[in-house]
Amino acid sequence: MDVLTSPFRAGWVGLVAGGLALAVPVQAGLARSGPLVEGSVTLAVLLTLHGRFVTEGTSGRAGSWWLVAFQAWLTYVPLAVFGPAWTPVCGLLSGALLVVAARIRSIVLVVLALACGPVLLAAPRSWVVDPVWALVTPLVGVVEYALLSLVARVRRLDGARTDVMRQAVAQERRRFTRDLHDLVGHRLTVLVLKAQLVQRLVAEGDEKAEREVVETLELLRVLSADVRAVAHGLRDSSLAAELGSARALLESARVRCQIKVSCRDLTPDVEEALTHALREGVTNVLRHAEAEECLIQLMERDNLVRLSIRNDGVRPPRRPGDAGQGLLNLAERVAGLGGWLEATTSRGGQFSFSVYVPRM
């Protein structure tokens, strides 16, 4: 893997492999029919140039045309000097052309495969150094192209894996932030309201103050468990239990609460989304309104589940159009299930908040 993903190493591995593959037939041919020293130097220059091309190809960049052009010059011009001993070098050039000419590489492969046989049959015997090497030479280019393509695919897969890991980390961060706000933020709001209620009951000398203190301590324990659950991604959302908690919370804040439920057997994803919607809606009733009455309805019609929360005593918004982070998080949850939110305010100070989610 290190060889494939390191452009420098992959380039020089290809260079060494190409040199070993071509040195034997070229050297043998030059020893019989051409100047050995000049041919060896030219071959070394050609292999160095080709190594540069391979390094560029494995680094994610397209091979330069000028390198291919220079390599073509060093491939064909020496043929006039060294003769048929130089023909195995053509394999490196064919590999470079296959890499560079990406759009026409299929045509090149077909033409190369079809032309190898007739060319070898029609070629003079003096131009065939060795029948085996004459057949292997065209394959050098195909093998080189296959290796470079493998390296390119490994690089793309490695980049895709890195992107997936980054997206997973970002998604987990968004989940943690969203759950922390939706769950812990709701509990903190309830704690503040409980503390204010205890303060008022103590001032009035009401015997209910002690009971409210006990409930506040229990809520603190629940909050601690919620924080651990959010941190570990363990969320146990029960819509029925949350409806009971919403009623108790609203009534403790002296808000008359009426709950109507006419649908059952929801899927876990839908139930979790509606549970968060219920928490957000009740939190908004307590935080942004001076409500005396609240109606919570859960119904189903045309395969669409609707949770609505309607209350009175609406205060003017702090900033027009400010949806708040909680509603933004909720909209993201619901949109992931193909649902949407609706919120309207009537002239009489009635606020209606509805969540629509398709039954899955």
Image (tube, rainbow, N blue to C red):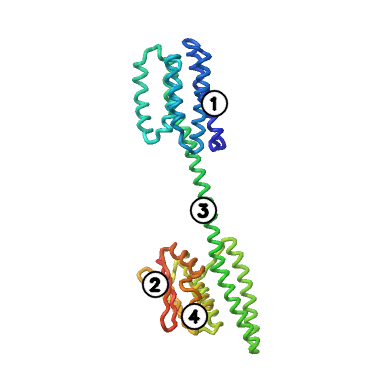
From mark 2 to mark 1, how far is it between C-alphas?
71 Å
For label 4, the crowd category at 10 Å Cα-Cα, with few meaning under 14, some 14 to 19 and many 20 or more, is: some
**Residue drawn at x 52%, y 54% as measured from the top left:** 168
Relative horizontal placement of residue 129, taking residue 3 as reference (left or right): left
**Residue under the image location 46 percent in, 73 percent down:** 320
**How many residues crowd mark 3 within 10 Å: few (<14), some (14–19), many (20+)?**
few
Q: According to the image, label 1 marks what residue? A: 16
Q: Secondary structure at mark 3?
A: helix
Foreground residue among 269 and 97: 97
Going from N to C along the chain, the mark reached first, 2 or 3, is 3
- Report, in whole angstroms, how far the alpha carbon at label 4 lies from the one at label 3: 40 Å
Looking at the image, tell me whether mark 1 or mark 3 is earlier in sequence order: 1
Q: Residues within 10 Å of mark 1 (few under 14, many from 20)?
A: some
- Which residue in the structure is indicated by mark 2? 300
* The one of 9 and 303 positioned closer to us in this rendering: 9
Pick whichever, 49 or 235, lies toward us. Answer: 49
What residue does disc 3 label?
167
Is 34 situated above or below 167? above
Estimate the spatial distance between the alpha carbons at disc 1 and disc 4, rounded to whole Å: 79 Å
Quarter location, residue 223: bottom right
C-alpha separation, residue under disc 1 versus residue under disc 3: 39 Å
Q: Which residue is mark 4?
A: 315
Residue 124 place in picture, x, y as percent: 37, 13
Distance from label 2 to label 4 (Cα)?
30 Å
